[in-house]
Amino acid sequence: MPISDAHIHFFSHQFFSLLAGNPEETCQKLSWTNPPHEPEDLAQHWVAELDQAGVSRAALIASIPGDELSVIRAKQAFPNRFVSYAMVNPLSGGMPHADLDVICLFPAMQGFSINSAEVDRVIQHASTVFVHCGVLSVGIRKKLGLPSRFDMRYSNPLDLHAVALKHPEKRFIIPHFGAGMFREALMLADLCPNVLFDTSSSNSWMKYEGLNLETVFRRALDVLGADRLLFGSDSSFFPRGWNRSVFDQQKAALQSSGVSDEDQQKIFHGNFERLFPVRAS
């Protein structure tokens, strides 16, 4: 089965510089591979990794504001392999880079309401918007002892309801099935056909609701259908590389739930290709 991955964090040299100041020292603390200075070289590493894993295309996420050029340059180097996502802080007053494919909003991290005028101004410049809802836990910040003073008052997927209705021409992607606010995310998606889920991460949030992965997929398929689910691995750093265990767990859950091969193909590959087709040069 072909695979397209809608959720890979592109931990570039610039990302580590913005996060903690010294990429080499930071990666040494984490026992991670220090990324090459140029994003094109890191993109080449990801191409080789994804080739080995059998992943045809992927979304690369610039996971800190100010790092959008890293994923843009990665996509420019390999336009048939990558889609560029980048975190944007609407409170900064800047506009998203014109070459970004998807803007990523983290309301709880940066302390803004998804219904604010600042967000609406940013959304005008994007066709697809990724909105992190629910529990937000950033593993790299924990490992480095960096504060994570996130405000969950801004985490409810239902806050996106009015925004999605106001912009029916735009697509909104909710990662991690709503990350602990699954019920609310389902309600949002039921009311707004332009809302999609990505299936990324270990989904440890399921402990809050006593769910297993099979049940999560069944409920999501009942509400959204197979056409609005995007597979994501939440891969991020080397030497681990692409996180195959996430794919294996999700594949097994869909198989055990009796999901058809056709619907699995949509989740793991087809929906991504439909949303982000390769443009002829």
Image (tube, rainbow, N blue to C red):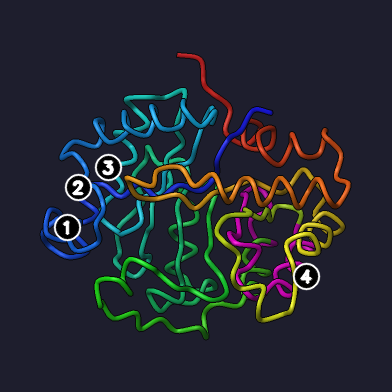
Q: Are marks 2 and 3 in contact (CB under 8 Å)?
A: no
Q: Is residue 50 above or below residue 84?
A: above
Q: Position of residue 262 (x, y in %)?
A: 82, 33
Q: Which residue is mark 2?
A: 34
- Is residue 190 magenta-colored? yes
Give 224 or 260, whichever is nearer the viewer: 260
Question: Element at badge 1?
Answer: helix
Q: Amino acid at mark 4?
A: Met
Q: Which residue is mark 4?
A: 187
Q: Is residue 127 above or below residue 1?
A: below
Q: State the CA–CA distance, disc 1 to disc 4.
A: 43 Å
| Residue 69, numbered label | 3
Q: Position of residue 100 (x, y in %)?
A: 40, 41
Determine the residue positioned at 53% across, 53% down.
Answer: 129
Callout in the foreground (2, 3): 2
- Residue density around tag 2, few if under 14, some if 14–19, many if 20 or more, within 10 Å: many
Q: What is the span of residues highlighted in magenta in the rendered image?
A: 165-192
Determine the residue positioned at 29% across, 33% down.
Answer: 73
Q: State the CA–CA distance, disc 1 to disc 3.
A: 25 Å
- Is residue 279 magenta-colored? no
Callout in the foreground (1, 3): 1
Figure quadrant of residue 164: bottom right
Q: Which residue is mark 1?
A: 28
